[in-house]
Image (tube, rainbow, N blue to C red):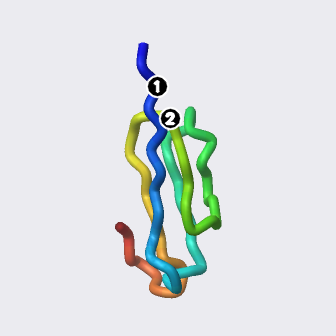
Amino acid sequence: MVFTTASLVTATGMGPYSWTGPPASGITSNTNQAVSTTVAGNYTFSDNSSPGLRM
């Protein structure tokens, strides 16, 4: 089995940040500019300065 790490990074100055991933990822309302994960699934980034913007 091969494990791959993915790094997800947003542009500087888009904060405050909020990342959420699948439950097994442990990424819930993470406020860092970048997150790393080995868990496959859907990840959502919200730019809290612009409500409703999702990338």
Q: How many numbered discs, if any?
A: 2
Where is residue 33 drawn, in percent x and y?
A: 57, 68
Please, is residue 51 above or below residue 36 in the view? Answer: below
Q: Which kind of residue does numbered mark 2 sit on?
A: Thr
Q: Which residue is mark 2?
A: 38
Q: Split into 4 quadrants, where in the image is the N terminus?
A: top left
What percent of the width, then of the height, locates residue 25?
A: 56, 38
Question: Which residue occupies the extreme top position in the image?
Answer: 1
Label 2, label 1: how many angstroms apart (C-alpha)?
7 Å
Q: Which amino acid lies under the numbered mark 1 shown in the image of this protein?
A: Phe
In the rendered image, the residue lying farthest to the left is 55
- Specify which label sits upstream in the sequence, 2 or 1: 1
Q: Residue at x 49, y 82 (%)?
A: 14
What residue sits right under mark 1 in the picture? Answer: 3
Left or right: where 2 falls relative to 24: left
Picture quarter with the C terminus: bottom left
Verify CB contact (< 8 Å) between mark 2 and mark 1.
yes
Q: Position of residue 18 (x, y in %)?
A: 56, 66
Rendered residue at 46%/82% (across/down): 51
Q: Quadrant of residue 29?
A: bottom right
Residue closest to the eye, 11 or 48: 11
